[in-house]
Image (cartoon, grey):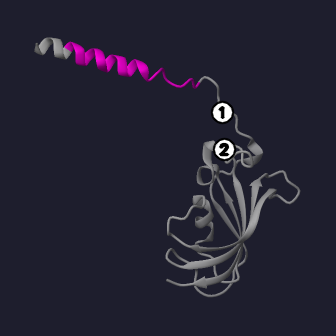
Amino acid sequence: MNSIFKQIATLACALALAACGGAKDYSEPVVLDPLTQVAELTKTDIAVGSGNPVVNGDRVDVRYVTYIYNRDAVDKKGTKLDAGQLSVPLGAGNNYVPGFEMGILGMRLGGKRLVAVPSALAYGPNGRPPQVPPNTGLLFEFELVSVYPK
């Protein structure tokens, strides 16, 4: 009886594994557009601002412009994707791409900053169809308009 149970269990496991299908075909390489690639998160202050640098726990009001990064664009920014003003509680697990908050940290009131964000800290391999293709870097232009310290 014990032997039959083992055989049935083995057969069930084999069927379950077979139902999972084969491994994904990785023979097709992912082609990355070199014009939209950002190697690492970089922050360039246009205007430093004043006061203490913002840290996790602070809430800030920030004006932003988001670009799909393109290093060959005339303005060296790319295609404008979005713009607006947000109130952001830093470090609160917001629904922004990780590079958005990382780019704001350390800014000072009145500061202006350009932040180049690699795909891994933006929308990654899935992108955000139809606006952001997979594996695409972003560029944020920030202006810190208000700071509410923790």
How far apart marks 1 and 2 lie (CA) works out to 9 Å
Q: Residue at x 14, y 12 (%)?
A: 3
Q: Residue at x 54, y 65 (%)?
A: 94
* Crowding near the residue tagged with mark 1, few <14, some 14–19, many ≥20 C-alpha atoms within 10 Å: few
Left/right of residue 76 with respect to residue 117 in the rendered view:
right
Is label 2 in a helix, a strand or a loop?
loop
Identify which residue, 34 or 146, lies in the foreground: 146
The image quarter in which residue 65 lies: bottom right
Which label is found at residue 30?
1
* Crowding near the residue tagged with mark 2, few <14, some 14–19, many ≥20 C-alpha atoms within 10 Å: many
Is label 1 in a helix, a strand or a loop?
loop
Residue 127 at what x, y percent from top left?
Answer: 66, 46
Identified by mark 2, the residue type is Asn
- Give the residue furthest to the left: 1
Identify which residue, 150 or 38, lies in the foreground: 150
Disc 1 vs disc 2: Cβ atoms closer than 8 Å? yes
The range drawn in magenta is 7-26
- Report if residue 137 is visible in the image: yes
Q: Residue at x 50, y 74 (%)?
A: 56
Identify which residue, 8 or 123, lies in the foreground: 8
Residue 86 at what x, y percent from top left?
Answer: 66, 73
- Report if residue 64 is visible in the image: no
Residue under label 2: 135
Identify which residue, 69 or 145, lies in the foreground: 145
Identified by mark 1, the residue type is Val
Left/right of residue 11 with respect to residue 122 in the rendered view:
left
Assign the N terminus to one quadrant of the image.
top left
